[in-house]
Amino acid sequence: MGTAMETVQVVLDRKLLAATDRAARKLKRNRSALVREALREHLQKLETRGKEERDRAGYARQPENLKDAKFWQAEAAWPED
C-alpha cells in the first residue's frame, strides 16, 4: 500500500512556478512529484549539515590529540599495490 498523501497549498512567485513546471515537463513528472523530491533532498541536506555542525562543535570542544591522529592516519592509509 502507498504512502498517505496530504494536500497542501504553497505560494510561489510566477518565475519559480514556471521553472518548476519546465523542470517537471523535462523530467516527465508531475509538479507535485518534483516538489516532493526537491523537498526530500533539501531536508536531507539540512539533516547532514546539522550533523556536520554538531561534529565540528564536538571537535572544537575536544580536539584530537596528535598521538590518536597519527594512529588513525596510519590505519586509514591505502595499501600499496
Image (cartoon, rainbow, N blue to C red):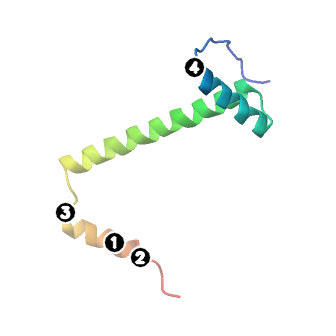
For marks 2 and 4, give the CA distance.
51 Å
Q: Earlier in the sequence, mark 3 or mark 2?
A: 3
Q: Viewer-proximal residue, 61 or 8?
A: 8
The amino acid at mark 3 is Asn
**Residue at 65% across, 31% down:** 19
73 w.r.t. 62: above or below: below
Q: Which residue is mark 4?
A: 13
- Residue 73 bears which disc, if any? 1
Q: Secondary structure at mark 3?
A: loop
Q: Are marks 1 and 2 in contact (CB under 8 Å)?
A: yes
Who comes first in sequence, dot 2 or dot 4? 4
Does residue 47 lie above or below 68 as drawn? above
**Secondary structure under the numbered disc 2 in the rendered image:** loop
Check whether the beta carbons of the residues at disc 2 and disc 4 lie within 8 A of each other: no
Rate crowding at label 4 as few (under 14), some (14 to 19) or many (20 or more) other CA atoms within 10 Å: few
Provide the residue designation for mark 2. 77
Across and down, in percent, residue 22 comes to: 72, 33
Measure the C-alpha gap from mark 3 to mark 1.
12 Å
Give the mark nearest the N terminus, 4 or 3: 4
Q: Which mark is residue 65?
A: 3
Q: Is residue 7 left or right of residue 55?
A: right
Badge 1 element: helix
Residue at figure coordinates x 34%, y 71% from the top left? 73
x and y percent of residue 8 in the render? 63, 12
